[in-house]
Amino acid sequence: MSSHLLSVDSLSRDHVDHLLRVAARMEPIAQRRQVTRVLEGAVLGNLFFEASTRTRVSFNAAFCRLGGSVCDTTGFTFSSMAKGESLYDTSRVMSGYCDAIVMRHPDQGSVAEFAAATHVPVINGGDGPGEHPSQALLDLYTIDKEFTRLGKRLAGAHVLLTGDLKYGRTVHSLIKLLSLYAPMRFTLVSPPGLEMPSQVIDRVVSRGHRVEQRDSLAGDFGDLDVIYATRIQKERFTAEMNESFGGLSRDFTVDRAFLDGRCNDSTIVMHPLPRDSRADANDLDTDLNGDPRLAIFRQTDNGIPVRMAIFATLLKVDTLIEHDLRPVRWFVPPSLGVDDPAL
Amino acid sequence: MSSHLLSVDSLSRDHVDHLLRVAARMEPIAQRRQVTRVLEGAVLGNLFFEASTRTRVSFNAAFCRLGGSVCDTTGFTFSSMAKGESLYDTSRVMSGYCDAIVMRHPDQGSVAEFAAATHVPVINGGDGPGEHPSQALLDLYTIDKEFTRLGKRLAGAHVLLTGDLKYGRTVHSLIKLLSLYAPMRFTLVSPPGLEMPSQVIDRVVSRGHRVEQRDSLAGDFGDLDVIYATRIQKERFTAEMNESFGGLSRDFTVDRAFLDGRCNDSTIVMHPLPRDSRADANDLDTDLNGDPRLAIFRQTDNGIPVRMAIFATLLKVDTLIEHDLRPVRWFVPPSLGVDDPAL
Amino acid sequence: MSSHLLSVDSLSRDHVDHLLRVAARMEPIAQRRQVTRVLEGAVLGNLFFEASTRTRVSFNAAFCRLGGSVCDTTGFTFSSMAKGESLYDTSRVMSGYCDAIVMRHPDQGSVAEFAAATHVPVINGGDGPGEHPSQALLDLYTIDKEFTRLGKRLAGAHVLLTGDLKYGRTVHSLIKLLSLYAPMRFTLVSPPGLEMPSQVIDRVVSRGHRVEQRDSLAGDFGDLDVIYATRIQKERFTAEMNESFGGLSRDFTVDRAFLDGRCNDSTIVMHPLPRDSRADANDLDTDLNGDPRLAIFRQTDNGIPVRMAIFATLLKVDTLIEHDLRPVRWFVPPSLGVDDPAL
């Protein structure tokens, strides 16, 4: 692994396996049974030039749980970039202040440009329609962990990706990561105009996986292992798309009726979140709340150990942590969410 | 005490007494003579969906002084709620990242809805016209501490609440807490249309306290122990109120003339702050600055030990702290504020 | 040194020398070879009522590297000042929460007004066209460090200040600090209307320095030791200035041609940053990136040890730190920026 994490494309199977193993070793800290001080004195620059409470807080908390401190920046208003500063200058200046930098930016390629100006580890926290590698890694980690719990294996698994497969960068990155593993079967379901880009599909097929594309959720999914539903990324639509696309129809909704009627007892449901809970959203219904197959909150929980693993690996403390652990002294509820049976 | 702090209504006299005792034990840390590391590794989600520098920084600093780390969020712009995420989802996701959550939100009931989705302790930092229990607790703690200093007792005390008693949620919560104690005498002074809601008054009266309502500060207050003045909450007014209400007249101003002429030497003056220092504000005059009876800054100072006590109690470290104390090593000015004689 | 740092005017030569010595002792921490915990439990209030990512993060990181915690506030929206609170009240309230306060504010004099209400150390992080003393100190520290590296002495040095010398507060403060030292030669180059104020020049001259004013960079600078270029501060222009001033002409640009053709091999180039990298900016060209004479990133790097020295001195832990040092355990890249040979 290079000194940055910018794209899943730079990750070999060995890198990915290493990160998943380190993430598993972070679980006692992420689940708040132990604390470490290994990054004490280190400073994270958490630069979010685009809104994202979830991802920002997740990176922030992960760094804190390693013992480090975090400087947050949100929005462009408070940025010297508004005064015409280049990414090169911002990057070089931040390198003098921080030991690692997470950056989210609306422009594709901007985080890579930023990273090129520094040797301090830079993590791409999302660059517009580009990449969001930590999300893909936590998605893969979730599938792996859920499969272990269910006694399943990746080889031969059937994975359904549904929703906005064109603008949803998380599905691009996830399918690339999964394609590093033993042959699987992917079913891709999206409304017309929001299909997965063909170069992504070609790459997956070239690695020996089976890919089927459909334009609806009709039919039987009795052998399905994973549903990965996504939100329509209207904010990334072209003007033309905005005019022609009326919204996701109810046919695309993953809900209890779909899961009970046409999937099986061990089909897990994932979503990169946020899911739109307004009545006309139709991506992932709230009637699955409390169903053990709904893995979306276990998935976000996994953001902590995975992001801890990314920091620990880039800052080369992944083997030091086991020598710097103490028990948690405060009260941790046995179940953090009210209806999450598997946590 | 339940696992959350959402309203003073859920607090029994025993709960309140416990919190005040724990707060007193936090004083050496709050006054910066000692430091603790008991919450090292813990993460607070400090979610302010409505502006409040004071309350946000106070919770933040209180958690830091217990040894924990804080992730701040301010405003809706940076929130995934803007993408249609429900409070349920936000709550469940944040539970995976944080060990305690403080939330301020403009909508009454929103914090309780948020708390219902998690077992991680949630503290209501103000939900619009609803509740703000930590403010009421620090107000009560202030009265208790000032009375101890002055050799007074709560039983039989005369408390004046003045200003916007309709929309000022802090006075509702404070009078409820005070009503748990030995019988007192309350005088309520507000302009027409901004009276204390009758159900609050009924409850106080039913517990054996004397309540008198007036529409001006005219008359003698020679036996007064506490003045609690409040700002007009114009931001919560209905359109109708906005039209009819011309502002607080000078007659409602608590100033040195009122205190010297019609109160006594030991009448303390409190205010939830911010006080409006513009010329036409008329809630609490700045001519009392430097007067030892002005307790408003001792009151805000008390926010630290009280909020530390809330965190320590909810996270069950209130008895551990005394075993994890070290002296402060940096310089602390003997008097932190310039003119505060009693600190 | 008083208990605040509001202006370079309050600093004697002894104060400045002390701060530079303490900053030098902070280098092992700033360069991430060692960590300290000396401010553990201390809280910094980092109040930025005007945008400045760089300065805010720099103060934040400096305090964290001393072991403390930071509460950030950015913008007026989130401030109770929007509800009419006075600087006096805000100051007094923050004193109860924080052990040191950094404040940036658009209004000249506002930080001094804020500081007058508290004994907690207050550092002026920039008050509009007023002062920005930590920037001047890090500029002086940079010149001193670069001169040591180059075997030069301050006495007799030739320093060029160019750009907006009227509104650029950093050049006012820097020349005042430099004037405390052995006689030097200053050349001031600015477009008409943006000259250095005459009272600043008079002060420098009265202390025995040579000052020459010009309206262009024409001519030979073969004996030049330091170029300090500045950005045009359009945001501080009067309406009249905005109308008459067309922008910095290309003649004012400090670039490789100027440095190679008319300066020398050891002329260092400084700039308070951000530099405007847009094509028509003309303050400091990017064609110097990678040139060892370009000291602008070593300059921003120096913000950390200098701000650590300010905190350590005001909080009186400057002599304690050497007894509380541990080695860094995480990986630090040998060169933090990609092209900075002298780091």
Image (tube, coloured by chain):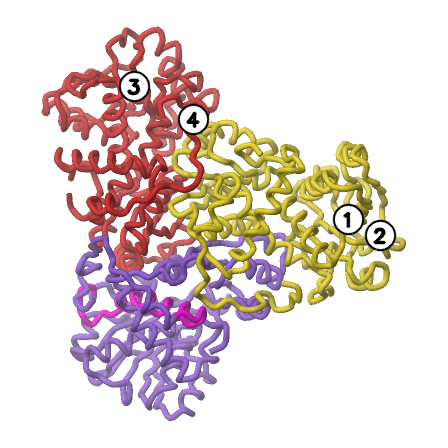
Chain colours: A red, B yellow, C purple
First-in-chain label (3 vs 4): 3
Q: Which mark is on residue A276? A: 4
Q: Which residues are magenta?
A: C289-317
Q: Are marks 3 and 4 on the same chain?
A: yes
- Distance from disc 1 to disc 3, alpha carbons, whole Å, reads 59 Å
Q: CA distance from mark 3 to mark 4?
A: 17 Å
Q: Residue B282 sits in which quadrant?
A: bottom right
**Residue C273 seen in this snapshot:** yes
Task: Give the residue number, with chain letter if any, for mark 3.
Answer: A227
The answer as to whether the residues below labels 1 and 3 share one chain is no
Q: Do badges 2 and 4 share one subunit?
A: no
Q: Amino acid at mark 3?
A: Ile
Answer yes or no: do the residues labelled 3 and 4 have beta carbons within 8 Å?
Answer: no
The C terminus of chain B - image quarter: bottom right
Q: Position of residue B21 (x, y in %)?
A: 60, 47
Dot 1: chain letter: B
Q: Are marks 4 and 1 in contact (CB under 8 Å)?
A: no
C170 with respect to A174 (left or right): right
Residue B162, numbered circle: 1
- Rounded to the nearest angstrom, the CA distance separating label 2 from label 4 is 52 Å
Looking at the rendered image, the disc whose residue lies closer to the viewer, 1 or 3, is 1
Crowding at dot 1, Cα within 10 Å, few <14 / some 14-19 / many 20+, comes out as many
Disc 2 designates what residue?
B217
